[in-house]
Amino acid sequence: MMESYKKTLAGWASGTAHGDAGGTGARVVVTAVPGQVEALRAAGLVGEGTTVYTPDGQEGTWGYDGSLEEPYGEVLVAGEFSLQVVPYALGRYIPVGGPTLLRVTETSDLEAYLSDADEAFTTGRFPGLVAGPTTLLADEPALGGWTGRGGPGDRLWVRADGEVSTSPWGAPLGTADDPLDALVVRWAAANDAGTPCAVALSRAVSDDERAAAFTERPWLGQYVKTLGVLRALAARGVDSARASGFGGRLDGALDGVPAGPGAPAPVLCWDAHHAYLSDAGRTVQIAHPLAVTVERILVLGHGAADLLGAAELDRVATYFADAGFPLLPAACAAGLPVAG
């Protein structure tokens, strides 16, 4: 049970929940102060499918001590799980040990995050601060990891005054008396009008700042996705993996070939012993020769037939598509060169 609530809280903080709540109400609701849950139930924001975290820890909820809203602090959940909350820029200069949530709380945090991303893209060296197995990046949809998730149906934060957003640093979407459908409509309208996610970090940095940063870095979505894969691999003891497209590729002939903008493709990593293909929270281990073929398809799309032959491209792409790792659709969606 402890692992379950830790994963649920991680999904709320990062904005990366998978699946559906399986009932009414938002998937996860976190309140800033005690005594708010009954009003949330009355409004339908908390329903039979909702996991609730609240300081008073009343029956049917998870209790916590500390603040998830302050820029720096420590939170104790259920009396046994300790989570350190650290602004991203500060995390570079203080010892980070144990479960840590890295937040963007102001422009300096965004600048530090982007600096680390640029370093990874250029050299292949990912920051241990955020690629380690015990750290989590808050509000990923607003930092380039936009997938359409992380909205009011997935997560809600209820401030002390009853104002509701998706994140402690997010723009207000309404109050605890508003129905969930109304919050979803306002969230969608904000994202239609700005750079997604145009809600989760609006109290920390301006949408113009984020838009400029993302325009300069069309690969940022793949960076966010790759960070998650590297964290998962590190938790399995694979802590020296390289990532395709960051500082080079497994197939050196593809070094410098741009991945292009658009939807992040499956992530291909490798170390001296194996390669790893990851997507949607799943990872398969494959041999280096097969990984080279996979990488060519991911980068070149149907154009990889010039290197592999049409029959081999179709065989490999079909195999991985059937296994839940669609190589060609991801490549096409990313705006990569596609022949024929």
Image (spheres, helix red, strand yellow):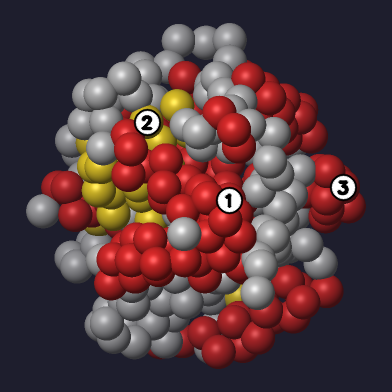
Is 166 rendered above or below residue 238? below
* Residue lying at 32% horizontally and 34% vertically, measured from the top left: 288
Q: How crowded is mark 1: few (under 14 residues within 10 Å), some or many (20 or more)?
A: many
In the picture shown, does residue 40 fall above or below 150?
below
Q: Quadrant of residue 119?
A: top right
Numbered label attached to residue 85? none
Specify the quadrant that holds the C terminus. Answer: bottom right
Which residue bears the numbered disc 1?
299
Which mark, residue 270?
A: 2
Q: In this rendering, would 52 be left or right of 247? A: left
- In terms of secondary structure, where does tag 1 sit? helix
Residue 282 occupies which quadrant of the picture?
bottom left
Q: Residue furthest left?
A: 1
The picture quadrant where one finds residue 115 is top right
N-term mark: 1 or 3: 3
In this view, the residue in front, 154 or 131, is 131
Q: What residue type is labelled 1?
A: Val
Mark-to-mark CA distance, 1 and 3: 25 Å
The amino acid type found where label 3 is placed reads Ala
Secondary structure at badge 3 equals helix
* Front residue of 182 and 141: 141
